[in-house]
Image (cartoon, rainbow, N blue to C red):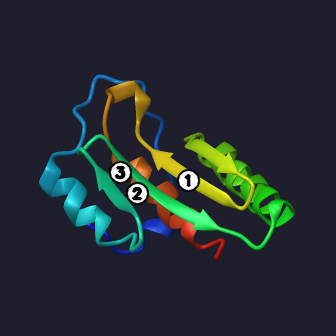
Amino acid sequence: MDSDNLAARKCRPCKGGVKPLSAGQAGDLLAGVPGWELEGNSKISRKFNFDDFRQAQSWLNSVADIAEREDHHPDIYWSYRKVTIELTTHAIGGLSENDFILAAKIDELG
């Protein structure tokens, strides 16, 4: 799996029936999204900190726009100035390339 230019790629619909990425494949793609952590080979996550509640809210609205555009949706945990994003492909019970594409697009928000 190629981790180059993940943010330029488009998420592909996943209805299930395909195998999740192997640990090796996930590790290769993880190199393309610094700051994200692999959790048990079933999801990736990253914590983000903001100056205040409204800044976090504004950023999350941008994440929601990207998720809708890509039709791939993260699990979001928000507490005042702290946001944790978890990505997994629920339809296959593990990681797909879509998770890494969405992570890269989220990272472009700054």
**Relative to 87, is 43 on the left or the right?**
left
Quarter containing the C terminus: bottom right
- At label 3, the amino acid type is Glu
> What residue is drawn where x is 76% and y is 61%?
56
> What residue is drawn where x is 29% and y is 40%?
42
* Residue matched to label 3: 97
Q: Nearer the viewer, residue 105 or 48?
A: 48
Q: Residue furthest right?
A: 54
Which of the 4 image quarters holds residue 57? bottom right
Residue 100's disc is: 2
Spot occupied by residue 14 in the image (x, y as percentages of width and height): 42, 32
Is residue 42 something that shows in the picture? yes
Query: For the residues carrying marks 1 and 2, which lies nearer the camera in this image?
Result: 1
- At label 2, the amino acid type is Phe
Disc 3 and disc 2: Cα gap in Å? Answer: 5 Å
Spot occupied by residue 90 in the image (x, y as percentages of width and height): 42, 29
